[in-house]
Every structure is written in C-alpha cells, then in structure tokens.
Image (cartoon, helix red, strand yellow):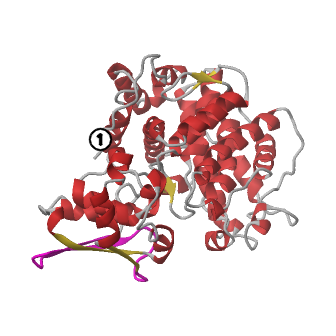
Amino acid sequence: MVQATQPTQTLSQFAATLRYDTIPGPVRVHCKSLLLDALACALAGRLGEETGQVAAFAAALAQGRESSVIGGDHLSLAGATLLNAYLVTAVTMCDVHRATLTHVTPEVVPTALAIAERDGLSGRALLTAIAAGCEVTTRIGLGLDYPKFRARGWHGPGVIGPFGAAAAVGSLLGFDADAMARAFALAGSQAAGTFAAWGTPTVKFHQCRGALSGLMAALLAQQGFVATREFLTAPDGGLYNTYTDGGNAEAAVAGLGTRFELEQIAMRLWPGASLVQGLVTALFDIVECEHLDAARVRHVRVGLAPGAFKMHGGFDAYKGKFEALLSAHYIAAVVVHDRTLTLSQFEPARYDDAGLRQFAAGKVAVKADAALRDSQAAVEIETVDGAVFSARCEHPLGSCENPLSRSKLEQKFRAYARGRLPDAAVAEVIAAVSELESLTSVRTLVDALRAPAHAARPAVAAAE
C-alpha cells in the first residue's frame, strides 16, 4: 500500500483497479441513483437561462457529431461533454457533496457517458466508472482541509472535478495506475475556479469546464504524455500545498475501498441552492401539515447557518432566475404561496410577480443562527391572528441521512423528461438505469436519451 504521503499514487491505484464486483451493493445502488438524478437535471437544464449560449459555444468548440446530447441531438465528443455537463447544473438542482460543497455528477457523468457511448461499453463499465469518478472527486476533496480551501476563495467543482472526470474516463479506457496518475496530474494542471464568480452563471461554468478538463487529461494521458506522478502533495505547486495549507493526505485515503465517500453525495428534489434545501424541507414540513392562507401570513422568520446565510441571505431583492434560485427570501415566499417548488416557480411570470416580490422583501426575515450548521434551517410562520407554526430541519431531503426514495427520483426524472422525450423512451431510460448491470452497450441508454427532432420545449411538471 502506498503511504498517505503519496495520495495521488494511492488514488490512482484505486481507480485503475476498481471493478464492478468489488463495489458494495449499496454503493452500486447509490451510483445508479446519482446517474438517474443527473439525467433528470440535464433534461431540466433545457430551461436554463444560459443554456442556449453554452449550446452555441459547445457546437463551435469542435466539429463532429459523434456524441449524444441529453435531450438533444449530436455534437462532437468535446462539445457534448461540455454541454451535457452544463445541462446537469444549469437550473441549480443537481447533487452536492456537502463536506466540500462540490457538485460531482456534472463533471463525472457526462464524461463517462460520452466515452461509454463512443466505445460501445457495457452498463457495468459505466457504473464502475461513475463510482471511480465520484469516489476520487470526494476523496481528493476530503484531503483539501475544506475550511481553509474555502477561506482562500476556491470553488470545488472546477478544482477537484477534473480529477473525477479523468478517473471516470481512465476507468473506461482501462488505464493502469501509472496512466491514471498521469491523468490526475494533467487534470490538476487545469484545476481552477473561485467564489469570485458567486451569484453569476460562471459558477456553473466551473462544472462543465471541469468535465472537459478531465476528458482532455485522460485522453492526453492515453497518448503516454509525460506528467508528474505525485501531483497532490508535490512540494512546489501540488494541489494540497498550493490551494490550502498542505491539506490532510491521510483523510483522502483513509478506508479507501472499504468506506465509500461517494455515499455522502446528496441529491435535490427541488430546484434551489444546495444550502437552502434544509429551508425548503422545513417549509414543506409546515405547509403540508397546515392549511395556511398566504394572505393571512404576517411574518416568515428563517434561520440559516452562518455560512448559508452569507451566501443566501442577501437576495431579498433578487434579479432574474439565478438569483431567485439562490434567494432564501424568494424560496420562502413562493413555497408559502404556491405550496410547491418546481421550475415553474422560477419562471419570470412567477418570480416577477409584484405581490410575491413585496412579500419576499417585506414579510420574510432571514438571519444567521450560530446554533445551526451547514444546510440546517429553522422556520417560524406567524399569521395575523397570532398563530405560530414552526419547523426545524436537521437533514434536508436528499441527504444521506434523509435520502430520496427511488420513486421520488423516478418522479423527478419523469417530470423533466415530459415534453422532451417520448413516454416510451422515459420508461426505457428508467428501466435501463435500474438494470444498468444488464446493459451490453450504453448506446442503448444514450439512444433513448436523445430527443426526437420534433421535441417541444418541455412542460414543467411537479416533481414533489
């Protein structure tokens, strides 16, 4: 076993030797859930405000039509990888590894799908690649010493995402440990992205650029391109010494192959920032049990953890869809009014409603609560007749402690596939992911995911 002082080597050996039969059953199930969730998010991503811009960029990036676009047609290998990754994250409802505040599937799933489709690989190979990519991403993140990493302004998807994308591609291409290590070095050489982009769509560009970076790293490593063998802890310019204060290499590899960190990747049933999912969970705990008339609500008081408040407590006067998706004020207001939360609540006709804007700015109070942490939230709703309803969320729906059921995930997929894929294709995709191990070729799944030429703009249906 390579010592923890050489985590690149340890992780490279793990990713290169991971096999379907060595992945525990619950981990396989979670990987399939992550895949179905990523596909649902990608279909929803057609409604992203910037999706058209990214699609045009992806089409111009390289010539070719060898790779499928989820819910679309064909682009080049690079273009499809980039666009599919953006689609997964476009409407702010994809996964998150909460320990590192990193969205993982936008970087891992599109790269794995593209290579598995290109080479006609099996469902087992795809599942193994997703496991390798997700585990490498989260493990490298654990070694960062995230609070210090975050204090320097770094954003996880663009920094550690390329490693996971490279691991997924390397797994599919049959890399040995040496080739995998070189792919990781090439991925790390492209690691970038900071929170200076917060509040703008550029934070989502970090995800799709991370996917493309990992793809390029692996394909270049396949050519035997020379790169350092120990990137993470290299004294001069290594990830842990440059992006944080040396990191914690032991945390990156402790229990590797026995305990899978990827099981800590959470999913979202509702659109909205990952750190406000606890708020949404608490709100529904109230509105689903109480018959509240929004017109009779005097105050909505929201408590968020200090970090969540810093990121989401300042959008009482939100501008546009993306800020509405980040705004604790708007989300509280619209859930109280509509008793639902889908992408319909983030269309201009809804978030620009004058009465709703007035309610969000005037009746919703959001504060930092030092007793809360991460995505925990506390909500208190007071009516004009003095009634008070309260709820506290310890674990948001979709977290590993409060997971989404398979039926909820399928419901989410159906909701955002409607109008984009034929009903028969929707059923085929759900069945293919459920029985991924039985697929002889991933092309069967990808073929079902392409939209027919006449596909209309998808209707937005309830995913709760």
Establish if 418 lies above or below 311.
above
* Residue at point 40%, 82% (across, down): 371
Image x and y of residue 237, in percent: 84, 62
Say if 184 sits above or below 168 in the image: below
Left or right, 238 with reference to 268: right
Residue at point 50%, 62% (across, down) = 98
> Looking at the rendering, in which quadrant would you find the N terminus?
bottom right
Q: Residue furthest left?
A: 385
Question: Residue 257, percent across and down?
Answer: 59, 52
Name the amino acid type tagged 1. Answer: Ser
Q: Which residue is mark 1?
A: 407
Q: Quadrant of residue 356?
A: bottom left
- Specify few, some or many for label 1: CA neighbours under 10 Å numbering under 14, 14-19, or 20 or more: few
- Residue 273 visible to the viewer: no
Q: Is residue 402 left or right of residue 9?
A: left
Residue 348 in the magenta stretch? The answer is no
Q: Is residue 149 left or right of residue 282?
A: right
Does residue 385 belong to the magenta stretch?
yes
Instruction: Relative to 414, say whether 146 is above or below.
Output: below
The span picked out in magenta is: 369-393
- Residue 273: give x, y in percent of width and height: 45, 58
Residue at the front extreme of this rendering: 354
Q: Quadrant of residue 167?
A: top right
Residue sitting at x 39%, y 70% = 376
Q: Residue at x 57, y 51 (%)?
A: 201
Left or right relative to 386: residue 339: right
Vertical side of 429 occupied by 377: above or below = below
User: Residue 430 placed where, x, y %?
Assistant: 38, 30
